[in-house]
Image (cartoon, rainbow, N blue to C red):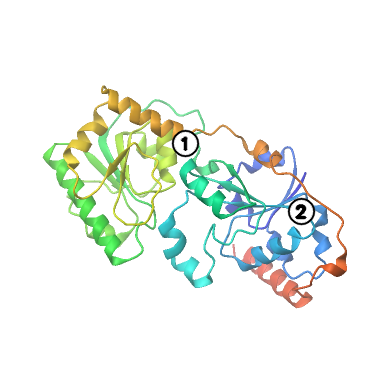
Amino acid sequence: MNILFLDSEKSVSKLLNIKSIASCHTVEFDGNRYFGLPDIFFFEKYDVILYLNFQNRANHLIIEQVNKIGISTVFISDGIYDWDNCFNNYTHKFFSLFTYYQLDSKYVFYCGDDINLRYLSKRNYGTEFISYIPFRNRVKGDEEVVCKEFDILITTANTAYFNDEEFFSLSTLINKTLSCCDDLNLSYKLRIFDKRLVNSLNFSKEIDNVTSGDISELAVKARAVIATPSSLNIDVSQLDIPIGTYLYRDFPSQHTGGWIIFSDLDIKRVLRELLDNKSVKYKERMLYQKIMLEQEINDNNLIEMVKSDKRCVDSNLIGKKTSYFSYFISFVLFNLRKAFK
């Protein structure tokens, strides 16, 4: 198949195994540089067109046009569905483009659990969702067995809160966890990038806040991980490490861990259960984590599941919403991006 990605190869390679796909198909990137071409039939040479930057209006305008000539279109989700992020992320609000809520593609490569999948499928009737795990979040299968060096890794998503209420709620919850770890003589490390959040926490200078390297390389050294809802939980779950998920806001939240931690809970008890790998409860919760994330589809199979629906269309029936001026601007911007990489 002839495949066009509207976004850059660097962006796409984080989500899909480009080397594997390119071995079986013809692949092209930076397709949004064609935005503005008045002749939409230029895109007829492609079988599938995919995009991942939902907040790029040029992507949506191209998808809207090529849908009219039956080319299969795919939106690639870059992480788990998060309600709070969809509606309160500054970029989403600035462009008035809320991920999953103005879907225009025929297919979606979806990352997440079946509960949210059912909701999004019902809400976006006619769009076919295909489950996958982003390439960056996959365990490659060649990890060595590593001795556990400490008890708990506490980490968050890069953007873990969207207002002061959420910030203070999360900060208080992490501080309670740190205090409980100290009382139980549990060793722990942090992986938190948000400086405001780090500065609000009460931990000694001897405690490491590790912000370099891969999350998997750090997590595999811990006996358990506690985190906010995030795609990084996918990495951890595949390593067969117990996950506690912080609950600190009122939006529907997807968690992939077997344990939930909130403010009025006996956190010391949860910490003990997180580390008690001999109990029946522990084994069942670990099984839950594994099943919720089980995914065996490879990237070539993902592409093959997208069916082409090319059809003959009278060009007079397709409105021309673009112009050569728009195309010129797209072309100039594309070359400027390349020049200043």
Camera sees residue 237: yes
Q: Which residue is mark 2?
A: 71
Where residue 324 sits, quadrant-wise, is: bottom right
Residue 173, numbered circle: none
Q: Quadrant of the C terminus?
A: bottom right
Residue 212 versus residue 101 in the image, above or below: above
- Where does the image place residue 124, in percent across and percent down from the top left? 58, 54
Name the quadrant of the N terminus: top right
How crowded pointer 1 is (Cα within 10 Å; few <14, some 14-19, many 20+) is rated as: many
Local crowd size for mark 2, using a 10 Å CA cut-off: few (<14), some (14–19), many (≥20): many
- The residue pinned by badge 1 equals 293
In the image, taking residue 322 as reference, residue 164 lies left or right, namely left
The residue positioned 32% from the left and 57% from the top of the image is: 250
Image quadrant of residue 248? bottom left
Q: In the rendering, at what x and y percent does residue 227 appear?
A: 33, 46
Q: Amino acid at mark 2?
A: Ile
Q: Is residue 36 above or below residue 79?
A: below
Q: Quadrant of residue 16?
A: top right
**In front of the other: 119 or 32:** 119
**Mark 2 to mark 1 CA distance (whole Å):** 31 Å
Residue 116 in the image, given as x and y percentages of width and height: 47, 47
Looking at the image, residue 210 sits to the left or right of residue 49; the answer is left
* Helix, strand or loop at mark 1: helix
Q: Amino acid at mark 1?
A: Leu
At horizontal 80% and vertical 71% (from top left) the residue drawn is 38
- Residue 13 in sight in this render: no
In this picture, residue 191 sits left or right of residue 188: right
Give the residue furthest to the left.
183
Give the structural element (helix, strand or loop) at label 2: loop
Q: If you read the primary sequence from the N terminus, does the residue marked by circle 2 or circle 1 appear first?
A: 2
